[in-house]
């Protein structure tokens, strides 16, 4: 006769929410040794996985919201446990019972009504492009440029969208944008446990892409890249998705973009988790930077597969992280050790966190934070 335990229902719920990888864990603790949390505070993914195995998710505590889904521990786990999937499964269960940090409630409401997490009006989504040479996307154009939420609305990140446009125009790319028809890609709210909202946003975007004859999509954010490329196919669609670092590499290779102006600075490059570990894009950004005349690329201690997370993935970009526990502060110190003039990256979340760290850290202002497009737009 089958034994029914009080925890059986919870275990089934965790499995259903995608967290069934816990069954392979043999509690070696390697995940805890590589987790960036343990460089700034204490957090045990091993403990969360153990809770999953026994159907005891502590969904009211803080720990289930800590994982940034940076991909470090799943990459190291000797048993192939999708550890962050376990954390996300707990969040899905918590969300079902209306339990999530206050910022996630606020963001969810804004995503549901306005299609962005920043509480900005949908009707203003294309304001960043006013006075720039940008057309609306029409069928037959070479590529759709999908800037995403932060480059559309955030005053710092709008500069990245503008730099991207200046590069595309210089290279003669036939591109357009969807403006207020664009919705958040939904990647981060999914990792924050709100699967229903993710599906709503994804379906809206997919319908818009199909209705407008979109085949190839250029994105600024590794998070948009990841979800369009690896998660939207769950809806039986397959768009060709290109991250800006890949596209710049393509434009240079084809001779459509010539990096001719000198940029005489020492630069260090930060690999965003969702570009690097999650999607294996390490070489293209470095190759482009090495092609800029006068630019010297110096590397930080932890790079490529071992890149140190900025702290913004998994919905953490919306949550408060106490001073002293911010991964981006640690990363900025690593950048400062290289004596680089500028820390360059290719993700709106990384830039947001690094800029915040720069402003709040002692001597933080000594390093300049840039998106890769901002350097390339000066070098053409
Ligand atoms: S590294 Fe893998 S096997 Fe080891 S404790 Fe973490 S999840 Fe379990
Ligand atoms: S995915 Fe990253 S943040 Fe999450 S538990 Fe693993 S190492 Fe820590």
Image (tube, grey):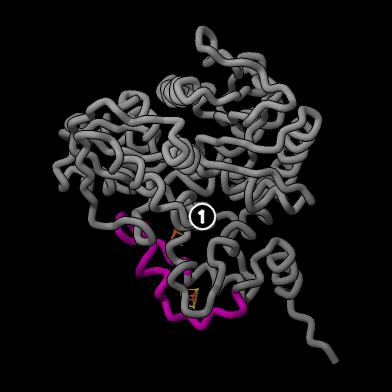
Q: Quadrant of ligand 2?
A: bottom left
**Part of the protein shown in magenta:** 22-45
Which residue position is annotated with label 1? 279
Image side of residue 50 versus residue 180, left or right: left
- Residue drawn 59% across and 62% down? 85
Kindly indicate the quadrant of the structure image that contains residue 54: bottom right
Image side of residue 13 versus residue 270, left or right: right
- When the figure is inspected, residue 60 is found, relative to residue 101, above or below; the finding is below
Q: How many marks?
A: 1
* Residue 251 point in image, percent of width and height: 47, 36
* Residue 129 point in image, percent of width and height: 54, 15
Residue farthest to the front? 255
Q: Does residue 93 show up?
A: yes
Q: Does residue 319 show up?
A: no
- Residue drawn 62% across and 54% down? 91
Is residue 40 located in the magenta-colored stretch of the structure?
yes
Secondary structure beneath dot 1 equals loop
- Residue drawn 23% across and 29% down? 263
- When the figure is inspected, residue 166 is found, relative to residue 326, above or below; the finding is above
Quarter of the image with the C terminus in it: top left
Image side of residue 380 versus residue 114, left or right: left
Badge 1 local density, few (<14 within 10 Å), some, or many (20+)?
some
Quarter of the image with the N terminus in it: bottom right
Who is closer to the viewer here, 291 or 268? 291
Residue farthest to the bottom? 1
Kindly indicate the quadrant of the structure image that contains residue 135: top right
* Residue 92 point in image, percent of width and height: 67, 54
Is residue 238 located in the magenta-colored stretch of the structure?
no
- Residue drawn 72% across and 51% down? 233
């Amino acid at each position: 006769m089958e034994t029914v335990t009080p925890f059986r229902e919870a275990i089934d719920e965790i499995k259903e929410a995608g967290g069934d990888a816990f069954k392979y864990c043999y509690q070696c603790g390697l995940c805890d040794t590589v987790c960036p949390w343990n460089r700034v505070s204490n957090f045990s993914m091993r403990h969360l996985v153990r809770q999953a195995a026994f159907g005891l998710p502590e969904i009211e505590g803080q720990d289930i919201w800590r994982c940034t889904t940076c991909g470090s521990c799943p990459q190291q786990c000797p048993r192939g446990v999708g550890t962050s999937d376990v954390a996300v499964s707990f969040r899905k269960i918590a969300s079902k019972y209306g339990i999530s940090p206050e910022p996630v409630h606020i963001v969810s409401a804004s995503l549901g009504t306005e299609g962005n997490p920043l509480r900005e009006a949908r009707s203003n989504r294309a304001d960043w492009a006013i006075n720039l040479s940008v057309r609306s996307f029409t069928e037959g154009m070479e590529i759709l440029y999908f800037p995403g939420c932060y480059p559309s609305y955030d005053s710092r990140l709008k500069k990245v969208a503008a730099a991207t446009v200046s590069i595309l125009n210089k290279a003669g790319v036939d591109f357009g944008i969807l403006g207020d028809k664009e919705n958040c890609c939904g990647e981060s709210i999914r990792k924050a446990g709100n699967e229903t909202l993710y599906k709503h946003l994804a379906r809206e975007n997919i319908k818009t892409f199909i209705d407008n004859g979109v085949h190839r999509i250029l994105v600024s954010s590794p998070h948009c890249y990841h979800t369009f490329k690896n998660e939207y196919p769950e809806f039986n669609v397959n768009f060709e998705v290109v991250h800006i670092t890949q596209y710049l590499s393509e434009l240079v290779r084809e001779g459509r973009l010539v990096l001719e102006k000198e940029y005489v600075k020492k630069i260090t490059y930060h690999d965003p988790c969702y570009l690097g570990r999650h999607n294996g894009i390490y070489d293209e950004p470095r190759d482009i930077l090495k092609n800029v005349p006068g630019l010297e690329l110096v590397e930080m201690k932890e790079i490529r597969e071992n890149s140190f997370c900025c702290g913004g993935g998994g919905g953490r970009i919306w949550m408060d992280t106490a001073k002293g526990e911010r991964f981006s502060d640690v990363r900025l110190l690593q950048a400062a050790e290289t004596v680089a003039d500028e820390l360059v990256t290719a993700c709106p979340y990384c830039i947001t966190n690094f800029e915040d760290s720069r402003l709040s850290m002692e001597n933080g202002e000594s390093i300049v934070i840039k998106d890769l497009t901002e350097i390339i737009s000066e070098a053409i």
